[in-house]
Image: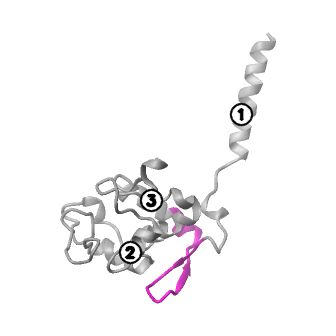
C-alpha cells in the first residue's frame, strides 16, 4: 500500500515541478539580450517578445530542416554563427542583410545567385513554405538568427560537436 502511494506522490511532485519550473521564454529575455544589429551601419534594434517567439517558430518551420542549431546540413563549412555571417560577401551579420539574403540568396562570396537551391522569396515557386512569408516574418527569422548566439552561445552554428 505504501509503495502505491509513494509512486503516486512522486508522480504528483514531478508534475508540479514541471508546471512551476519552465524553460526560458521570450519574456524572460531582458532588453539587452533582445538587442540585435539592425543594419550595416551598426544601428541596433530591440526585438519584442512577440518577435522573438514568432522568429523562432518561423525559423523552425521554414529553415530548421537544413539549419538545425545554426549549422548548415548541406555545407557544414558555412553556418549561421556570427563569424561565418560576418565573413560572407556581402556581410550578413545584421537583420537587414539577412532579410535581403532571404529574398535573393547569393553564394558565400556574393558572386552567384543560389535562389534555385536555397529557399527564398525569389524561388517561392520551388519552395512553397516561402510563399506566405511577409517582410515582418523575414525580419523575425533574421532576428532569431541574430539572437541565438546570445542565448546558446558557441553551440549556435557549432555543428556536430553539439548536435
Displayed quadrant of residue 4: top right
Q: Outermost residue toward the right?
A: 2
| Quarter of the N terminus within the rendering | top right
Residue 32 spot, x, y in % from top left: 64, 74
Q: Which residues are magenta?
A: 34-53
SS at mark 3?
loop
| 3 and 2 marks in contact (CB < 8 Å) | no
Residue at figure coordinates x 49%, y 59% from the top left? 156
Question: Residue at label 2?
Answer: 87
For the residues marked 2 and 1, what is the alpha-carbon distance in whole angstroms?
47 Å
The reply to whether residue 138 is visible in this rendering is: yes
Q: Earlier in the sequence, mark 2 or mark 1?
A: 1
Q: Earlier in the sequence, mark 3 or mark 2?
A: 2
Residue at figure coordinates x 43%, y 74% from the top left? 139
The reply to whether residue 135 is visible in this rendering is: no
Question: Residue at label 1?
Answer: 14
Q: Is residue 121 above or below residue 60?
A: below
Amino acid at each position: 500500500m505504501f509503495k502505491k502511494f509513494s509512486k503516486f506522490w512522486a508522480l504528483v511532485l514531478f508534475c508540479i515541478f514541471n508546471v512551476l519550473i519552465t524553460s526560458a521564454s521570450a519574456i524572460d529575455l531582458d532588453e539587452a539580450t533582445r538587442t540585435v544589429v539592425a543594419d550595416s551601419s551598426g544601428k541596433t534594434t530591440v526585438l519584442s517578445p512577440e518577435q522573438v517567439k514568432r522568429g523562432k517558430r518561423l525559423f523552425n518551420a521554414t529553415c530548421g530542416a537544413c539549419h538545425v542549431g545554426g549549422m548548415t546540413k548541406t555545407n557544414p563549412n558555412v553556418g549561421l554563427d556570427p563569424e561565418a555571417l560576418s565573413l560572407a560577401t556581402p556581410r550578413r551579420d545584421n537583420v537587414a542583410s539577412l532579410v535581403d539574403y532571404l529574398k535573393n540568396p547569393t553564394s558565400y562570396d556574393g558572386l552567384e545567385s543560389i535562389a534555385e537551391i536555397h529557399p527564398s522569396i525569389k524561388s517561392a515557386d520551388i519552395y512553397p513554405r516561402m510563399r506566405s512569408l511577409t517582410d515582418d516574418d523575414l525580419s523575425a527569422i533574421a532576428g532569431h538568427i541574430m539572437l541565438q548566439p546570445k542565448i546558446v552561445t558557441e553551440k549556435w552554428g557549432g555543428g556536430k560537436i553539439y548536435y
